[in-house]
Amino acid sequence: MSSIRPTARASDEAAPARLPGTGRAVALLVLVALGTLIPLLGPSAALHGTGEAAAPGAGGIGLLRAVLFAALSVPLGELFVHRLARRLPGVPPERPRSWAAPAAAAGFAAALGLAAVVSAGDLIPHGLGQIDVGGLYGSRDGRLALLEVNGFLLAALCALARRPAAQVWPLAAVVVAEALRAHPTTEQNAPAGSGLTLVHLTCAALWAGGLLHALRLVGLWRGSPAGAALLGRYARVAAVLSAAVTATGVCSALRRMPSATILDQLTTTAYGRTLLAKVVLVAAVALLALSARIRLSRAADPLTASVPGRAEVVALGAVVAVSGLLTALPVPIRWS
C-alpha cells in the first residue's frame, strides 16, 4: 500500500503541471488567429476614405508576407540566442525543441504562394492554369520569388539534418531577395533603399526571434542563474538592434514620404496610416523593453523581467503582422 501512495502523489502533482503548457498553447493559437486578422482585414480599414485602391488580394498577400517575416525571425532568433548562451558560464545543457524546421516549412509555403502570385501577373491565381512557373525565370521579381522559395526549402533541410548553423546562408539569401524585391530598379536610388531594408529586416528578425527563444530558454532553465544572465546579455544586444530598426525605419519612411508631407500622408494615405500604427506598436515594444531592463537591474528576482518580455513578444508579433500589411498597400505618391 505504501508503494502506491507516492505514485498517486506523483500523478496528482504531474496533472497540474500540464495545464500551464496547455494554456500557453491555447493562448498562442488565439494570438496567431487574431494576428492573421491584421493583414486580412487591414487593407479595407487603411484605405477607407483615402481614394486609393489596393491591388486585388491585398489581404492575402499581406498575410503571406507576415508569415514569411515570422518564418525568418524564428530560426534566426534561435541561432542568435544560442550563440549568446554559449558564451555564458554554467549554462544548463537543456535546450527547448527547435522551431526552426516548422518555421522554415511555413516560410516555404508562404514564399510558394507569393511566387504563384508573381507568376500570375501579381494577381491572386484562381486555378493552376493561371500559374506560369516557367515565366518566373523571365522577370526580376520572379527570380527573387524563386530564390525565397529555395532559400526556405534549404533552411528546412538543414534544420531537419540537424545542421542548424548551415541555415544562416539560405536564410540570408531570403533576406537579400526580400530587400531587393521591395525596391524595384525603377525606384529612385534603389540600392540605398535595398540596403536600408536589408539592415531593417535582419535586425528586426534577430530582435523578435531572439526574444522569443530567450524566453523559452529562461523558462526551461527555471532556477538557474544562467537564465538571468542570458536575459541581461540579450537585452544589451537588443538595445542596439532596436536602435538600428528605428533608424532604418525612419530613413525608409522619409524616402517614401518626404519630411514636408509626411505628417499629412500619415493620416490621408493607407500606407501612412499603417506606418503610424506600426510606429505606435514599436513605441509600446520599447516601453515594455524598458520595463524589462529596469526589472533586470533592480528587481530582487531578475527573472521577473520575463513578464514584460512575454508582452513584448506579443507586441512584436503584431508589428510583424502590420509589416506584412504594409508591403501589400499602395506606396504613397511623392508630393512635391
Image (cartoon, helix red, strand yellow):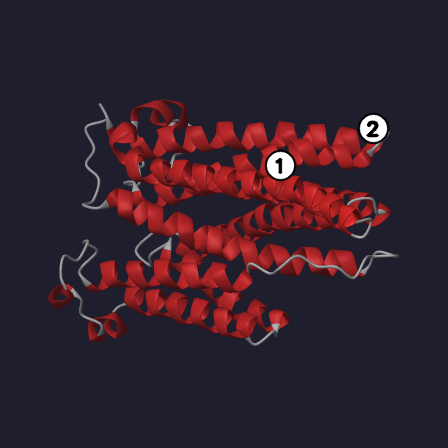
Indicate the amino acid at tag 1: Arg
Tag 2 secondary structure: loop
**Residue 2 placed where, x, y %?**
82, 49
Q: Residues within 10 Å of mark 1 (few under 14, many from 20)?
A: some
Tag 1 secondary structure: helix
**Residue 175 placed where, x, y %?**
48, 60
**Furthest-front residue in this view:** 1
Depth check: give the residue in front, 200 or 150.
Answer: 150
Snapshot quadrant of residue 296: top right
Depth check: give the residue in front, 196 or 92.
Answer: 92
Residue at image position (66%, 48%) is 216
Snapshot quadrant of residue 326: top left
Residue 75 placement, left or right of 336: right
Residue at image position (55%, 38%) is 23
Relative to 322, residue 46 above or below: above
Image quarter hosting the C terminus = top left
Indicate the amino acid at tag 2: Ala
Q: Which residue is mark 2?
A: 299
**Residue 132 placed where, x, y %?**
18, 70
Look at the image and tell me whether residue 286 can be seen: yes
Sequence-first tag of 1 and 2? 2
Residue 104 placement, left or right of 114: right
Quote the CA–CA distance across marks 1 and 2.
17 Å
Q: Which residue is mark 1?
A: 310
